[in-house]
Image (cartoon, grey):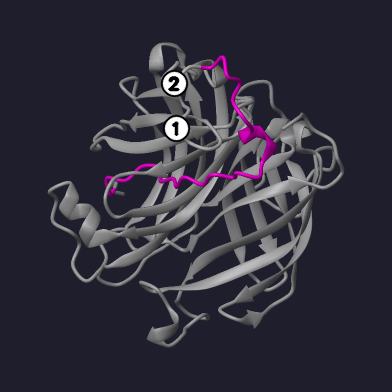
């Protein structure tokens, strides 16, 4: 599949009421470097939003695909802040009608800078990031870091991108199925491809995708092998869950079963089958030492007239641990 020239997309949100954005000590000087809050740390994230295709492609001097305007997109991944202003990381991105970019990595030329801005109220550790990926044009972001370094917010500053993300500290080694054993709540919004059995009038879809949302719970069982699932690899744990989706306003309660497997680098795979007869494949990024799971759907579908498969679901979602276990935030 050809890559569409897109990388992780983010939006900046300032939570003035959040204690971590509190008053900066007077000893901190305007313009003083504050990269110590994030250096040698990784932050996991789930993001979602929209891409104005004609506007974005015009900004990079590339002809836009015909008859594609505003499309939804979503993804999940992590960013690692390295010494000397360097950045590494990985992301999987789903872009409506344009394609799925799995496991997109950042080149060593990616970089960031941070300094205290005391002209803002409250004062902020803020700066910029430039991310470079193989074969792609540079992408630029504004960055905000909480005063305790436990949260980052970003906005993509390239024309045509309208996407939001919040990042929290994440490990990138030492993970296993046991890391996420337990119960998690789920609550998310996304987009599904408007194709049979889900066909809706044109005025109820965006670029061929219908909106959906769901809320429910899921339990990961590392010591219970998945039963009756021939595609489950050796070493997998099992998953059970339930939720209530609203598919363009149609309420469809369901139950779910499946398997999952976590790799030592704190990424993993999740495969679910639901009681409505659907199967779903997702990539996982483990956040907050197992207190949160960042997921992105990687299912695709083929449409007439398009050269490559497109995402069947535009969905980035975060599951939050319900039983109080896991590391600190």
Measured from the top left, where is residue 124 in percent x and y? 51, 31
| Mark carried by residue 119 | 1
Q: Residue at x 29, y 72 (%)?
A: 304
Q: Position of residue 254 (x, y in %)?
A: 74, 71
Is 107 drawn above or below residue 320 in the view shown?
above
Labelled pair 2, 1 in contact (Cβ < 8 Å): yes
Question: Where the C terminus falls, by quadrant?
Answer: top right
Q: Residue sitting at 37 percent across and 31 percent down?
A: 128
First to last magenta residue range: 4-28
Tell me if 153 is positioned left or right of 18 in this view: left
**Residue 313 coordinates in the image, percent (x, y):** 50, 62
Q: Nearer the viewer, residue 93 or 58?
A: 58
158 is within the stretch colored magenta: no
Question: What secondary structure prevails in the magenta region?
Answer: loop
Residue 159 drawn above or below residue 242: above
Going 53% across and 38% down the picture, which residue do you hit? 121
Earlier in the chain: of badge 2 and badge 1, it is 2
Q: Which mark is residue 30?
A: 2
């Amino acid at each position: 599949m050809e890559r569409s020239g897109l990388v992780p997309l983010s939006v900046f949100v300032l939570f003035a009421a959040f204690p971590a954005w509190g008053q900066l000590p007077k000893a901190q000087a305007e313009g003083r470097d504050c990269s110590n809050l994030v250096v040698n740390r990784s932050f996991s994230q789930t993001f979602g939003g929209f891409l104005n295709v004609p506007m974005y492609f015009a900004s990079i001097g590339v002809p836009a695909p015909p008859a594609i305007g505003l499309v939804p997109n979503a993804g999940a991944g992590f960013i690692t802040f390295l010494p000397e202003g360097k950045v590494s990381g990985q992301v999987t991105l789903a872009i409506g009608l344009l394609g799925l970019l799995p496991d997109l990595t950042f080149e060593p030329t990616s970089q960031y800078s941070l300094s205290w801005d005391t002209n803002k109220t409250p004062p902020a550790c803020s700066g910029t990031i430039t991310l470079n990926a193989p074969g792609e044009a540079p992408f630029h972001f504004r960055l905000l870091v909480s005063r305790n370094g436990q949260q980052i917010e970003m906005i993509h500053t390239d024309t045509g991108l309208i996407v939001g993300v919040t990042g929290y500290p994440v490990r990138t080694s030492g993970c296993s199925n046991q890391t996420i054993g337990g119960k998690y709540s789920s609550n998310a919004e996304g987009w599904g491809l408007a194709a049979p059995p889900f066909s809706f009038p044109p005025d109820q879809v965006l670029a061929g995708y219908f909106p959906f949302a769901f809320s429910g719970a899921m339990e990961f069982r590392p010591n219970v092998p998945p039963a009756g699932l021939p595609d489950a690899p050796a070493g997998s744990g099992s998953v059970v869950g339930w939720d209530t989706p609203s598919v363009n306003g149609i309420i469809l309660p369901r139950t779910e079963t499946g398997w999952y497997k976590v790799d030592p680098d704190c990424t993993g795979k999740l495969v679910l089958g639901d009681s409505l007869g659907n199967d779903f494949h997702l990539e996982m990024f483990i956040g907050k030492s197992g207190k949160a799971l960042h997921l992105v759907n990687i299912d695709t579908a083929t449409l007439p007239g398009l050269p490559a498969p497109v995402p069947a679901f535009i969905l980035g979602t975060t599951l939050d641990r319900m039983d109080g276990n896991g590391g600190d935030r």
